[in-house]
Structures are given as structure tokens and as C-alpha cells.
Amino acid sequence: MSEEKLKELLKEKEKQLYEQVKSILNWLEELGDKVIYGTESEEQQAILEFLKKTLIVRREQVYYPRDRKWTTYYEFLLNTKPMVWVTSSSIGTTIGFFTRDYSFAKCEWEWMLPAEAGMLIDAVVDYISDLEEPPIP
């Protein structure tokens, strides 16, 4: 495959990814509105709907020596192709492909989350933090 053809293919894939992420962001904002403005029941429903579309929940603890404290981060990998990940502040995706010389190339995109979507993720984190066992979607 020529380099020009590869660039063209990547541009087309970028457009598809952008549309996919835009759709997911709209969905996250709708769920976030339920968390912010809805009843307690609607908030619970939004959290569970998000978890149903979550394939993997990753929890990472980081120690900051300067602050002398641990911080816990959650990352949610959604059940989409290609996989989209969400944190309380951003959303992103990665695609990889082999080049003509059989080396592996990777492209990653990341966008900031709108406030409503961030509120949803914070509510989900609060929900799963209170559980003794992690939820099984």
C-alpha cells in the first residue's frame, strides 16, 4: 500500500472515529443531564445504563510525593469498535495498523469531556467506589 493511500485511509478512519465519538459524547451528555437534573431513580438508571455499555473498568492509584497523597483514577473502556475510553475529564480512542514495512503504527485521539458527561462519570465512580465487589456489566 502506498504512503498516499495509507494517508487517505487514515483520514477516512479519522472521520469515522470523530462521528463515533461525537455520538458517544451526546449519549454521555444525555445521561449526565439525568444525573444533574433527574430524580434519584433517573440518576441510578443513567449510571446503570453507562455500566451496561462498559467493557472494562480500570482503577489506577498514583502517589504524588510532593503532595504526599495517593490519588485514584478510573478509566472506563466502552464496548465499541474501535474501543473508546472515558475518564472523568476526557474521552479518547486509539487505532493501530501495520505499515508497508510491517512496523506497527498507532494513532491516538483525546478530547475533553463536557461538564454534564464529567458529572456522569463522577457519579459512576461514586457508585462503584461504594461497592464491595466491582459491577459485572
Image: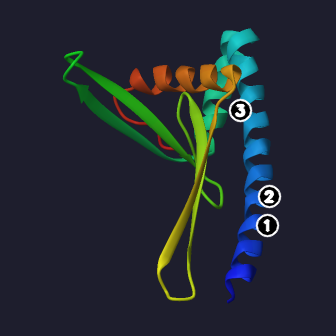
Left or right relative to 123: residue 12: right
In percent of width and height, residue 75 lies at 47, 39
Query: Quick one: quadrant of the N terminus?
Result: bottom right
Q: What element carries label 1?
A: helix
Q: Which residue carries the number 1 mark?
A: 12
Local packing at callout 2 (Cα closer than 10 Å; few below 14, some 14-19, many 20+) is few
In the image, residue 79 above or below residue 52? below
Q: Is mark 2 on a helix, strand or loop?
A: helix
Local packing at callout 1 (Cα closer than 10 Å; few below 14, some 14-19, many 20+) is few
In percent of width and height, residue 5 lies at 75, 82
Q: Residue at x 63, y 60 (%)?
A: 82
Q: Which numbered disc, 1 or 3, marks the residue that appears first in the sequence? A: 1
Q: Which numbered disc, 3 or 2, marks the residue that appears first in the sequence? A: 2
Q: Which residue carries the number 2 mark?
A: 15
Q: Residue 59 carries which label?
A: none
Q: Which residue is drawn at 23% across and 27% down?
A: 63
Q: Distance between the residues labelled 3 and 2?
A: 20 Å
Asked if labels 1 and 2 touch by Cβ distance under 8 angstroms, the answer is yes
What's the amino acid at mark 2? Lys
Q: Residue at x 57, y 27 (%)?
A: 121
Q: Which mark is residue 28?
A: 3
